[in-house]
Image (cartoon, rainbow, N blue to C red):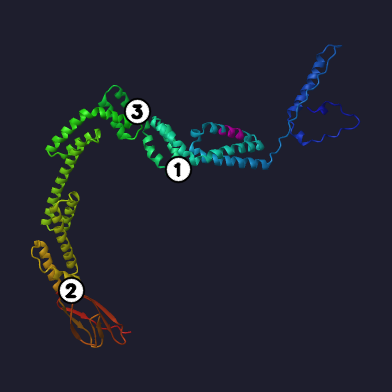
Amino acid sequence: MNDEILQPSSLDAPAAPPVKTKSDKKKPSWLWLLTLGLIGGLIVIRMLSQPGEEIVPVAPTATAVPEPTATPDPALRLEAEAALEKVLELMRALRPAEPARWAEEVWTQIEAEIAVADGSMAELKFSEASQQYAAVIPKLESLKSRLPELPEELMPKAFEAYAGGNKADAVALLQIVLFLEPENEQATNLLPRAENADLSFALLKKAEGWVEKSEWDLAFTELSRLKDMDDQFPGSGELRTIVEEKLAVASYKKWMSQALVAMENDDLVSAEAWVQKALDLDPENQATKDLQQQIIDRRVQQNVLLLKREAEVFAHEEKWSEAHKKWLEMKALDPGAPWIQDGLEQSLKWKLISEKIRKGLADPGSDQTGLWVKEMQDRKGWPVKLSARAEEMAERWKVAITPVKVKLTSDFETQVEVTKVGRWKPFAEKELSLKPGKYTAKGWRYGYRDVRVSFEVKPGQEDLVVEVKCVEGI
């Protein structure tokens, strides 16, 4: 409260109005009301007091005037905001790596310190906020510096969680590793198995329970399910070995016996299945391996005989390329069989001849076709259809190389030339003998546009007339 309000004023001259300062302008109106209330209270007390009774005046209580809020220094604010941005940048780099999982205590402390700095920032205490953010930055940078080595540190923890059936922790840790190192082959291979860690672990525990009760069949069933889900789950391999050893004696004899019966009935599919079961129980048993090899040999024999029948069908149809392919397949199955080698060579011979004939028929007038015709004159012992095709090629070659009569007509004014044949002075008609093929006749005459006439001479063609004359003046 302003003490001047309670002081008497001079009667000689009016008092000058007080100058309102910036601080006075900010005084709330309730100060005036409080002052008037106090004065009124004093008057009431005086009126109610008895005559002669001494009244002790009550001194008015001074009211504190609030200090004006200082305007924050822009430089401090910028400094604090820069520190905050650095903190946010580091946090953005770290959060996907979930520091709470591998640096829980430090991360919790960092978050608490950031909360304090955020509070200072909200209260516009920029100097304090700047210092508080700055104190956090080295800790964040220290965590960030650990990121390159983090995959190696987290992989054992992830494997431990996976082996313990802790799916959530295992998957989370592996995802952190793959975020930091996307090409990490170990984490990539483990992740799909870790996603079933809880189920795999449960199957392992069930199998262990059956083992304790000596229920080997039931234990083997659970371990088989586990093998289908994750054949590398920790502990499953060792337990499976124990169970298989217990089952081996009875199951081995049973499955081997069934395999032998299936072989006698030529049911190789069933025989292979029973032998495979026996091998699953005892992979190193030599008797099982020998029986498996017998089945393989029997299968090869069946396949070779089947391929031989198919090759013979193709040979009968004179499809030599297909027949040769079947002989090659037989050779791959049984490289040592001499009769396979004979069939392979014979089919190759006819295949090559058939290919030559095909090309010769496609271009009967070529020089190469002529060489093949001479090469295939002696066709003793040839397959009937192949020999007929060779004969057809020879006939078509003869026709293709036999010249055809062609009549050129003109107008006694045009000079004519047939490319690679000859050039002539103006004529009315000229007869040529040309081999089958494509030709171009040219004509020229002074004062007229040159002409070109393309024509084709086909084997055995008759009455072919080609007109060449210049008729369009320049």
Q: Secondary structure at mark 3?
A: helix
Q: Which residues are magenta?
A: 110-118
**Image quarter in which the N terminus is found:** top right
Crowding at dot 3, Cα within 10 Å, few <14 / some 14-19 / many 20+, comes out as some
Q: Quadrant of residue 276?
A: top left
Q: Position of residue 421 (x, y in %)?
A: 22, 81
Type of secondary structure dominating the magenta stretch: helix
Amino acid at pointer 2: Lys
The residue that disc 3 covers is 202
Q: Nearer the viewer, mark 3 or mark 2?
A: 3
Estimate the spatial distance between the alpha carbons at disc 3 and disc 1, rounded to whole Å: 31 Å
Q: Secondary structure at mark 1?
A: loop
Mark 3 and mark 2 lie on one chain; the one further toward the N terminus is 3
Position of 70 with respect to 116 (left or right) is: right
Position of 444 with respect to 315 (left or right) is: right
The residue that disc 2 covers is 458
From this view, report whether residue 344 is shown above or below residue 74: below
The residue that disc 1 covers is 181
From this view, report whether residue 135 is shown above or below residue 439: above
Crowding at dot 2, Cα within 10 Å, few <14 / some 14-19 / many 20+, comes out as some
Q: Position of residue 341 (x, y in %)?
A: 15, 55
